[in-house]
Image (tube, rainbow, N blue to C red):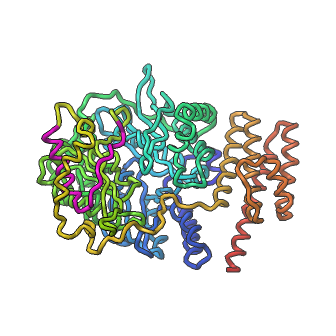
Amino acid sequence: MTVSAAATCEIEPLVRLSDLDEYREGLAHRLDGRWDEEKWTAFRVRFGVYGQKQSGVQMVRIKIPGGVVPLPWLSVLGEFNREFCRGDAHITTRQDFQTYFVPLERSAEALEFLYSNGLTTREACGNTLRNINACSLAGNCPREHVDAGLVASRLARSWIRHPLVQHMPRKVKISVSGCATDCGVSAIHDLSFVATERDGGKGFVVYAGGGLGGQPRPAVKVLDFVVEEDLQAVVETLARLHQRYSDRINRNAARIKFVVKRFGEEKFRALFQEEFERLRLLPQRPWQPLVWRKPGEAAVERTPLGVVKQHDGRFAVVGNPPLGLLSSDQFDALAALGRDIAIGHVRVTRDQNVVIPDVPADRLAEVVRRLQAINIDVPSSAADSADVVSCPGTTTCRIGITNSQGFGREIWAESQNDPTAKGISVRVSGCQNSCGLHEIGDFGFQGLAKKIDGVPAPHYQIHIGGDGRTGVQPGVVGLHGPIVAARHGLQALRLLRQGFASGRQAGESVRTWAERLGKDGLNALLAPLAEADADGKLFIDWGDVETFKGAPTLRGECAAPFASDDLLADLADDALIRLDRHLLVGQWDDALRSAEQAVVFSARRLLHLAGQFTKDDEAATVIIDRTRAVAPARAQAALEHVEALRTAALSSGRAEAYRQSVTVFLDTVRAITEAAGEKQDAAE
């Protein structure tokens, strides 16, 4: 995104072919050796290109805002997967598509194919605003106030390419729910919106600071009510607090939840509200009014499946491709189905399901039959189906410990003939990072390595009774249960489901049942595992043929590094944008502060180029004085011009010339740093 576009509040498209030009240049720098692996990783993850455990190939993540897939994209996805990838594409628990085994040298060609057909990978990975999620039945649910998928899509377009969110301390995950049922699972997100009505007004409740992983915590309510026009200011609030307070040194403690932990909930809430009140007065990107509805009553399933009646009398058909895996042929078949029934889009869900919306009653039987014919199960309801979700695990992931997908396949296959599996959610992750959402399933399995007689073997930590929706009692994150060898995982799940089916009391959820049994009761249920036979395969994971080697040694890219110069350049551009926004509403003092920040961020680039370290809390006057001593002559001249025009602006109250001088300084620094980089590349 250009600074001018942001300053004039133009809307951003999902795809700009200039993104492709930027990626091609970066790939060329990597292939010819000018960029090292760290700089290349920091660069490519922002374009959705992510390293696999297999060398030389990449996972490409395609961003699907709100899970809404326009019908023409299905054919594109099928052709893309067939031409550039190997194996099936994967619906992720963030409503993206992941595709695998793209050769590095073909990655630019692969992105060109996607971008030319309207799909983007931009900011699907990296320390960015990740894909914004919405309810599974967004746009169709009888209970909704508003189409949460449309809200997610608009917010994605409002913030894509914005310099403020390109190099954050860590990623930010956002969700939108269409009503208080909260199918967007707000409690586990960095930021979430839940549509509501208050005193006849339509708006949203806002939560922030949730997350899973090694230190899970539920989100806290930060704003009781905001109108739709202020949603973009809420996102900006979170991004600015993240940039200001999150830890850039320890990447493992750099999510928003750690800011909440640092300040405490009350202080964090106060900081959020104070920042929001400042930012909501500034111009934002255009926002067309949403269409709001009066919610109706309807049964709600945590994981909708089967045929669901929409609010308009038509039907949504929710099918389950096992573990969210789709082949190129299945994409083509879905596209043909959509064309034949004349719908404009399909949706994908965080439960790895596919939604065919807007189906007329006289086409229902045909849609169900055609989905089942391509191995997409359409049960009568979620209560009559197995609900199994898994991340890829060691099939492709650099930091996967166990083959969660192999285990998930076994769970799925066995569940088809097990009546105790119906209506029970099972979530499987290959490590502690919870990409399979193991902490919010009825039964969750977290992969880990543990030794048996001194030899590493694949194991799973079991979690019991989690649910990521706000307002769900008694808790969001599942209880920690026993640890079992991976080869005993199927039997452990079977024993737990049977114990719940036979021992639950009236009205008990999995969570309340497990709390009543306690640790001793759960261990007693699993006592038969002590005598279980694993056919001598305790050291061979599900789906594997080789002996387990232990936890991986590769470094993950979820917390990819960032280049400090790129960060400072983006923050300088963002400060220049804020300068213009403050001027538009007559906030003269704030405009001057933003201009000074833009100059300081760029000055720090020159100091770093000269080998001098800087700190975020150094005074502007100190940075400027240090810069004068080391900057090239043309940068010194541009800086002196800025200082002179600032003095003039203070006395005259006119900003045009001063603003232009700041822009010239930023451009001068950009040219100097780029030239220095090219010179270094040539020398190497």
Image position of 231 with respect to 13: above or below: above
Q: Nearer the viewer, residue 557 or 206?
A: 557
Image position of 218 with respect to 296: above or below: below
Q: Position of residue 144 (x, y in %)?
A: 34, 33
Image point (33%, 69%), residue name: 455
Image point (33%, 32%), residue name: 473
Which of the 4 image quarters holds residue 216?
top left
In this picture, residue 496 sits left or right of residue 241: left
Q: Residue furthest top?
A: 199
Q: Quadrant of the N terminus?
A: bottom right
Q: Position of residue 575 (x, y in %)?
A: 69, 47
From the image, give the main secondary structure of the stretch colored magenta: helix
In this picture, residue 11 sits left or right of residue 397: right
Q: Position of residue 433 (x, y in %)?
A: 41, 54
Image point (33%, 64%), residue name: 451
In this picture, residue 93 sits left or right of residue 151: left
The span shown in magenta is: 475-503
Q: Position of residue 651 (x, y in %)?
A: 88, 37
In this picture, residue 401 sits left or right of residue 642: left
Which of the 4 image quarters holds residue 611?
bottom right
